[in-house]
Image (cartoon, rainbow, N blue to C red):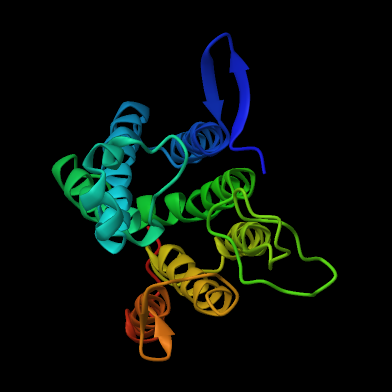
């Protein structure tokens, strides 16, 4: 693992933080380009991205800290150290959606259309960040003897399921599927709900191979959240707006 990607003098560039920055930059550029093509104002889209970026960082860190609370109670200062990882995608997604709904309503942007533009780049960003997880040695899998197993945990040579790569490949596939699907939706916002559905299916499955400490019964907390999200997304896609064509 390479948690420190490179150094500039005494300054350390962390793999996770670097890939997070790359993900934000690439996805912001792609989203704003698609928004301009759709005739949406660039300055409002830029503002939206900035608000969502801050909200996602706060939400993802907050949920991660809550899930690992005993660790952070013993070292409260480390709560603010995110350069080497420690973010929960579920938390970032919830906070990002909430701020996105507030911002688009305030600036009178078409919420469903904006959500559909965001969806593929959420998947792409997730894929890029998981490469950071691989270098950082976090979000690793359970010990395994499969021939593609890797020493995927920080400071641990145990061969494991490289769940970071599973996540990267799944998110990349979701990104490509959403691009194929974007001209086949029935209503504005459907592509975003398809992202939620596909992400939740992937996350539920990959949790069986991850080294996870937070279980509730036979499932992990991530699996329970994914089941709820998948059911909600499927219900929205199937039941609303009941086949009515409305993608404007």
Position of residue 107 relative to residue 162, above or below, is: above
Is 21 placed left or right of 80 in the picture? right
Residue 179 in the image: state x and y as whole percent. 61, 57
Q: Residue furthest right?
A: 147
- Quarter of the picture containing the N terminus is top right
Q: Residue most toward the top?
A: 9
Q: Residue at x 43, y 34 (%)?
A: 83
Left or right: 247 in relation to 20:
left
- Residue depicted at x 63% and y 50%: 134
Seen in the picture, residue 152 relative to 23 is either above or below; the reply is below
Residue 89, by quadrant, is bottom left
Give the x, y percent position of residue 24.
47, 36
Most foreground residue, 13 or 144? 144
227 sits left or right of 108 in the view: right
Q: Is residue 110 visible?
A: no
Q: Position of residue 59 (x, y in %)?
A: 27, 51
Task: Give the residue furthest to the front.
Answer: 74
- State whether residue 177 appears in this view: yes
Q: Quadrant of residue 168?
A: bottom right
Which residue is nearer to you in this view: 158 or 4?
158
């Amino acid at each position: 693992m390479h948690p420190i990607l490179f150094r500039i003098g005494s300054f350390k560039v962390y793999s996770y933080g670097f890939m997070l920055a790359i993900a934000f930059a690439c996805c912001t550029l792609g989203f704003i380009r698609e928004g301009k093509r759709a005739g949406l104002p660039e300055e409002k889209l830029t503002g939206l991205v900035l608000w969502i970026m801050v909200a996602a960082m706060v939400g993802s860190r907050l949920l991660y800290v809550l899930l690992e609370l005993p660790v952070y109670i013993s070292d409260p200062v480390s709560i603010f150290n995110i350069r080497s990882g420690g973010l929960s995608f579920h938390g970032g997604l919830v906070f990002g959606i909430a701020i996105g709904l507030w911002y688009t309503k305030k600036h009178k942007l078409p919420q469903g259309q904006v959500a559909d533009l965001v969806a593929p780049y959420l998947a792409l960003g997730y894929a890029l960040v998981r490469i950071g997880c691989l270098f950082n040695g976090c979000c690793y899998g359970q010990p395994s003897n499969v021939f593609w197993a890797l020493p995927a945990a920080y400071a641990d040579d145990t061969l494991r399921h490289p769940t970071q790569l599973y996540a990267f490949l799944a998110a990349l596939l979701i990104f490509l599927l959403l691009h194929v699907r974007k001209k086949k939706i029935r209503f504005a916002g459907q592509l975003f709900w398809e992202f939620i559905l596909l992400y939740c299916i992937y996350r539920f499955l990959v949790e069986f191979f991850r080294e996870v400490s937070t279980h509730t019964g036979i499932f992990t907390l991530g699996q329970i959240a994914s089941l709820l999200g998948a059911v909600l997304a499927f219900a929205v896609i199937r039941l609303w707006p009941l086949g009515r064509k409305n993608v404007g």
